[in-house]
Image: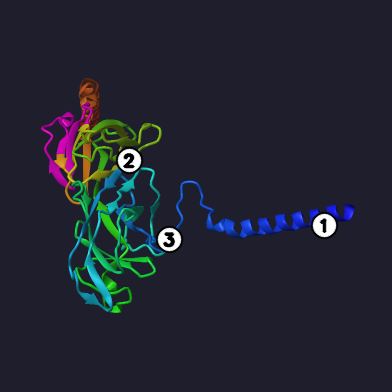
Amino acid sequence: MKTRTRKTTRVLCASAIAMMTLLSSAAPAFAVNDGEQATTTSVAQNKTFTFDKFLKLKKDAKVPPTQFNFTVASNDTGDGTEVDGYTVFKGVGNPTIGEATFTSAQTTFDSKQGNDDINLPEGYKYAKSNVTVNFNDVTFERPGIYRYTITENAGSKYFTSDTSTKYLDVYVYNDRDITYIMHKENNLFTTNDVANKDTKITSITNTYNTQNLSVKKEVDGNQAVEDDFFKFTVNITDLAPGADIEATGLDETKNTLKSWTASNKGTVTAEIYLSENSGAATFTGLTSGAKYTVKEEKGTYTPAATVDGDSATLNGDSSLGVTREISGDADNVVFTNTKNGTIPTGIYLNHKLPFNIAGIAILGGAISLFAKKRHDALEEDDDE
């Protein structure tokens, strides 16, 4: 009885082990994570393409909060032709394309990083963002080259934007894998075509155009004091809304505010204090086309002003200010205050009488001495 029971137990255990082994070997064929579908060879892989968006700007400027928008569309160049064994098709479906977003807190680089495809001039830095083209809702029916165009939409006047048409070739292989080639010429070539490698690109670059404004204080005259501070009001208009403006060279003890953000109307008003010894204040980050008015608080002096060395009319009143549009990279405004005092020569006039009396007394003494000597000489002649 015990022997039969043991045999039965062994059979049941063996059956259980066999069943568990069978189930465990079959499990991967059915294991699908929540929210996922089993991958099959009928679904193309790698259905997103990402390229770099660079923003160049001067090293003394801040990254403006901005977005750049793009359009992706079908292109039919070479549709139906054969290129090195590839069949060319115009782009199918409706791919979508994202935006390039930049913020004032964006990291910037003073030199080219890694493989970044950017030409950086002297005195410039750059910020980097990414743009993704999404083909997830596009069905590629067969292998071949599918052609699309990518165009940046015209941005604001504060940027030099690259709105030229770019071409995106999507290489779909029979194993459903995908390769992307973006280039700047409307020609057809394969991924291994060395002759056209210079037209292949991985980025699109814009430039943020900024200018500077320098304000300097000078004094002249025998009553001028080089350490005296003068109050200035600097009004800047026609800025990009939200542009960050900074001022360098301001005296720490007299100026607590050194940065400003342009209003929605693109204006900034800054009050600063300058002396001749404090040097010049330089406002940086003014967007292209900015206008300014620099006014000095009226005082007991004769004011004058120059812009880039040329005389600027104040009509004898510095509170009227200098109003200009910045030309070139920068404007340099200099306010000169002249204050003279008349040297008091009246001290000699007020003491004229004592001086005259003294002169008369001396002259009288000289005449008396001469007369006495003359008298003595005559007496000597009589005695002889």
The residue closer to the viewer here, 203 or 341, is 203
The residue closer to the viewer here, 211 or 48, is 48
Within-10-Å neighbours for mark 3: few <14, some 14–19, many 20+: few
The residue closer to the viewer here, 302 or 128, is 128
Mark 3: amino acid: Thr
Is 313 within the magenta? yes
Q: Is residue 363 above or below residue 27?
A: above
Provide the secondary structure element on which disc 3 rests.
loop
**x and y percentages locating residue 121 in the rendered image:** 30, 61
Mark 2: amino acid: Glu
**x and y percentages locating residue 344 in the rendered image:** 23, 27
Is residue 226 visible to the viewer in this orientation of the structure? no
Within-10-Å neighbours for mark 2: few <14, some 14–19, many 20+: many
Which quarter of the figure has residue 338?
A: top left
- Which residue is labeled 2 in the image? 246
Provide the secondary structure element on which disc 1 rests.
helix
Give how far apart the Cα atoms at labels 1 and 3 are: 47 Å
- Which residue is labeled 3 in the image? 40
Q: Residue at x 80, y 54 (%)?
A: 8
In the image, the segment drawn in magenta is 296-323
Q: Is residue 48 above or below residue 318?
A: below
- Which residue is labeled 1 in the image? 7
Precedes in sequence: disc 2 or disc 3:
3
Provide the secondary structure element on which disc 2 rests.
strand
Q: Residue at x 22, y 31 (%)?
A: 296
Is 214 within the magenta? no
Give how far apart the Cα atoms at labels 2 and 1 are: 91 Å
